[in-house]
């Protein structure tokens, strides 16, 4: 597993960004998140050792732009170089998430065709309105490996019309003292949709404010992922 952030900075784009951890962390350090700049790790996937081997070891998943959005407008002039590096490193598997899926068709490389084998795209949704908008676009795009990320989930949603050709759905709540509550029933509902379509499902994290069996729990941030794992409700496709 490796992380690659060729640029940093982002803008709040929709309701799911309200308590974004990137903005909160930058604010504590006095950094302006809205300033999009290239990082000194821009060429990380193709950097080599003195012996000519790539520094980034073959075969691993590379989490791309997990502190920004790979499709953000300000990075348009830099993205072509990134696509070239992704193509060169066909021995790595790149994964990025986006709330800007409507931009995707206009900024893919000329040799994309039906998608690169080594790229997984995750489309992030947080409520029904944006699930319908983004996933209706997502389903029509030429992408070989696609995930749906329902995090932070802020209401009950139906994504069943969009699950064809989806490999994984991730769901989770919001992390902040003012976070909107996550109802466990919403998670179970998405899980059932995934099972019905034989799509892998992962409950990634509880919300800071978590409703289960009608009772509200207030959880510590460090407990959110471990509590989700304890639920033991993840589903792997093909096990039916």
Image (cartoon, rainbow, N blue to C red):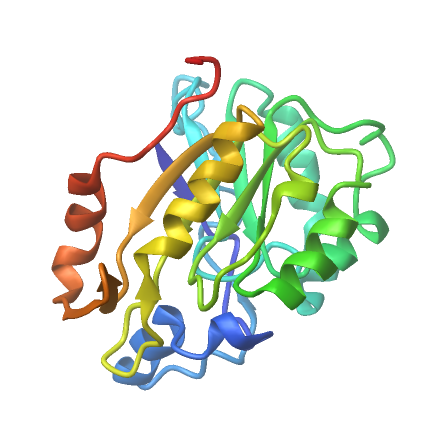
Task: State the residue in front, 216 or 30.
Answer: 216
**For residue 65, side relative to residue 110 (left or right):** left
In this view, 222 is above or below 74: above
Which quarter of the figure has residue 18?
Answer: bottom left
What residue is rendered at 43% in x and 18% in y? 58
Image quadrant containing the N terminus? top left
Residue 194, position as x, y percentages in the image: 51, 34
Residue 129, position as x, y percentages in the image: 66, 67
In this view, 124 is above or below 211: above
Q: State whether residue 81 appears in this view.
A: yes
Residue 187, position as x, y percentages in the image: 38, 50
What residue is rendered at 29% in x and 83% in y? 178
What residue is rendered at 47% in x and 66% in y? 155
Determine the residue located farthest toward the front in the rendered image. 214
Image quadrant containing the C terminus? top left
Q: State whether residue 46 appears in this view.
A: no
What residue is rendered at 35% in x and 76% in y? 180
Determine the residue located farthest toward the top in the rendered image. 239
């Amino acid at each position: 597993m490796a992380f690659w952030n060729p640029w940093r900075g982002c803008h709040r784009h929709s309701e799911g960004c309200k308590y974004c951890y990137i903005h909160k962390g930058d604010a504590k350090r006095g950094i302006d998140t809205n300033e999009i700049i290239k990082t000194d790790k821009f060429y990380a996937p193709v950097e080599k050792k003195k012996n000519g081997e790539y520094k980034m070891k073959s075969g691993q998943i590379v989490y791309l732009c997990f502190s920004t959005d790979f499709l953000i407008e300000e990075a348009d002039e830099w993205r072509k170089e990134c696509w070239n590096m992704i193509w060169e490193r066909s021995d790595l598997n790149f994964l990025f998430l986006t709330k800007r899926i409507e931009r995707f068709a206009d900024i893919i490389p000329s040799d994309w065709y039906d998608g690169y084998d080594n790229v997984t795209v995750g489309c992030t949704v947080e409520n029904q309105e944006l699930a319908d908008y983004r996933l209706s676009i997502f389903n029509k795009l030429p992408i070989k490996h696609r995930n749906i990320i329902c995090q932070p989930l802020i209401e009950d949603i139906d994504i069943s019309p969009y699950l064809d050709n989806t490999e994984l759905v991730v769901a989770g709540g919001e992390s902040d003292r003012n976070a909107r509550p996550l109802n466990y029933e919403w998670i179970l509902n998405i899980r059932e949709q995934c099972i019905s379509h034989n799509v892998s499902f992962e409950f990634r994290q509880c919300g800071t404010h978590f409703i289960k069996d009608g009772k509200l729990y207030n959880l510590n941030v460090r407990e959110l992922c471990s509590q989700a794992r304890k639920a033991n409700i993840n589903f792997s496709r093909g096990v039916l």
